[in-house]
Amino acid sequence: MLVVQRVRVRWGAHARGATHAVRRRSVAEAYEIPPLPAGEMLVVHDVLADEADGYRPASSVGSGVQAVRAVGLQVDLTADGVVIKRLPARAAYPAWRTSYRMFMLRPGQYGRYRANFQFTGYACSARWYYEAWTVHVASASPRPDLFLGAVADRDVDRRVHLYGGPARRTARQRPA
């Protein structure tokens, strides 16, 4: 069985300051898995914490290939395990036009993917907003605490600086 949990934090351009950043960082990166549909081999728990709702998490549960595609992933079964691919993003930045392989999981393994994006609405209603994603994928039987405190066997971090300038360096990163 493959269990996917996508946690998204969404905010608008007006919420880019330090006060909102502190609130965004308080949103959990993993949640308890709710009861899932019985007999399904691919299940998805999608969580959204939107700034417009005070960053209160709202979740939904889906199953099957379409539910996995809806969270931006593709799953390929191989003789060795499950290959997890990231589908092309419709984000304004960073824009990925092709899918790419993130990792392969063997039975009992867990992988984590982190990314952030800048999105825009349609031309007639251009509204910029941002999302930070943490996607957990486990080739395991579901249990409520599956991703809580777990250490990922595979970890992909594709986060970028979203606000148009170079990332700030910390004191430890400055050249000597």
Image (cartoon, rainbow, N blue to C red):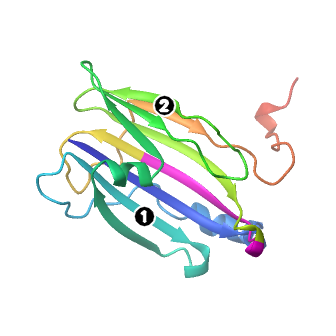
132 in magenta? yes
- Asked where in the image residue 70 lies, by quadrant, the reply is bottom left
Q: Which residue is mark 1?
A: 47
When the figure is inspected, residue 145 is found, relative to residue 87, above or below; the finding is: below
Q: Position of residue 71 (x, y in %)?
A: 45, 53
> Which quadrant of the rendered structure holds the C terminus?
top right
Q: Position of residue 121 (x, y in %)?
A: 69, 67
Distance from disc 2 to disc 1, alpha carbons, whole Å, reads 21 Å
Q: Secondary structure at mark 1?
A: strand
Q: Residue furthest bottom?
A: 53
> Which quadrant of the rendered structure holds the N terminus?
top left
Residue 147 visible at all: no
Residue 1 visible at all: yes
Q: Secondary structure at mark 2?
A: strand
Q: Position of residue 90 (x, y in %)?
A: 63, 51
The local crowd at label 1, few if under 14, some if 14 to 19, many if 20 or more residues have their Cα within 10 Å, is many
114 in magenta? no
Q: Which residue is pictured at 54% across the width and 34% down the height?
A: 99
Q: Which residue is mark 2?
A: 102
Q: Which residue is pictured at 49% across the width and 50% down the height?
A: 134
- Asked where in the image residue 114 lies, by quadrant, the reply is top right
Which amino acid lies under the numbered mark 1 shown in the image of this protein? Val
- Asked where in the image residue 20 lies, by quadrant, the reply is bottom right
The magenta region covers 124-135
Q: Is residue 1 left or right of residue 109?
A: left
Q: Which mark is residue 5?
A: none
Q: Position of residue 39 (x, y in %)?
A: 11, 52
Q: Nearer the viewer, residue 163 or 127?
A: 127
Q: Which residue is pictured at 20% across the width and 60% down the height?
A: 36
Q: Earlier in the sequence, mark 2 or mark 1?
A: 1
